Image: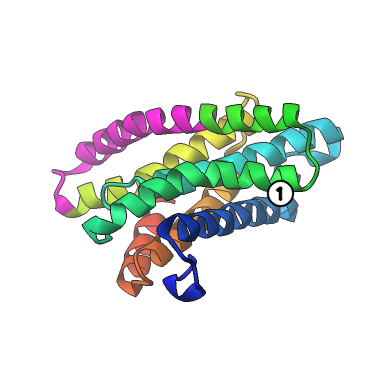
Amino acid sequence: MVSDEAGFESPVQLAGASAAALAEESAHQAFKLFQNKEYRRSARFEALDMVEQDRIFNELVVSHLVLIMLILEAPDLRVAPEFRDHLARLKELVPKAYVDTLKSLGVEDEHLRMWEQLISLRYEEYAKDRHDVRSAAMHLEAREKRLDLDDLSRIQLLVPVQAVAIGCHHHVCRGETDGRDELFKLALNALARFYTDVRIRLEGGKITFGMKARRFLRRAL
């Protein structure tokens, strides 16, 4: 996150710079996963042409961007109430920041509009999927024991990253997900690490959250 001490004259400028940094980090982490040897092997890249590989990379980038948007609106994010308006502004600016980056690289307007539509489409899809993920998680937990506050907290914490990972995996595989469990685990692990890192930064570097999140994620995985 960009600090207030960076010399910005207004909250709008600060939000814009923060959004650009988050968008850049999304693309960077998506590229790391895309270049991961195990992920490429599990995705059978050697049998895919460049158009299909580019499509997969785009899905990974969009998934990281949407995950940030879901984090910024998460009701359990531990931030001061007066900081919520800033987060709402950030959520709206992150997609624009990424599209602006593409524009600066010379991407044509037609493709920029396609990116805007894709990000909006995936956000709507994954935001909606959160309800199904939460319901399924609560159902599975309740089969083993009576749910307590710790269980509910863990379910709420994991919902965004699970919804995005499931949706991303579905699109990467074009819906043919049978026998692709290892590919899903690699994406979930990468998205979970990104999710934890972003939340820790947004919450002011609280180590307690990081420890709790990693414990919950290890248990879920």
Residue 131 located within the stretch drawn in magenta: yes
Residue 90 located within the stretch drawn in magenta: no
- Asked if 217 appears above or below 173 in the picture, the reply is below
Amino acid on which the number 1 mark rests in the picture? Phe
Q: Secondary structure at mark 1?
A: helix
- Asked if 23 appears above or below 160 in the picture, the reply is below
Which residue, as the protein is rendered here, is positioned at the far front? 9
Residue at figure coordinates x 37%, y 52% from the top left: 87
Q: Position of residue 58 (x, y in %)?
A: 68, 38
Please state the total of marks drawn on the protein image: 1
Which residue, as the protein is rendered here, is positioned at the far top? 175
Q: Nearer the viewer, residue 20 or 70?
A: 20
Q: Nearer the viewer, residue 17 or 30?
A: 17
Q: Report the colour scheme.
A: rainbow
Which stretch did the figure color magenta?
Answer: 122-149
Q: Position of residue 166 (x, y in %)?
A: 50, 36
Q: Position of residue 115 (x, y in %)?
A: 65, 32
Q: Main secondary structure of the magenta part?
A: helix
Q: Residues within 10 Å of mark 1 (few under 14, many from 20)?
A: many
The residue carrying mark 1 is 34
Left or right, residue 46 beside residue 114: right
Left or right, residue 49 beside residue 176: right
- Residue 10 found in image quarter: bottom left
Q: Nearer the viewer, residue 215 or 117?
A: 117
- Residue 163 found in image quarter: top left
Residue at figure coordinates x 30%, y 36% from the top left: 134
Residue at figure coordinates x 50%, y 73% from the top left: 7
Residue at figure coordinates x 32%, y 66% from the top left: 209
| Residue 32 seen in the figure | yes
Q: Position of residue 215 (x, y in %)?
A: 36, 63
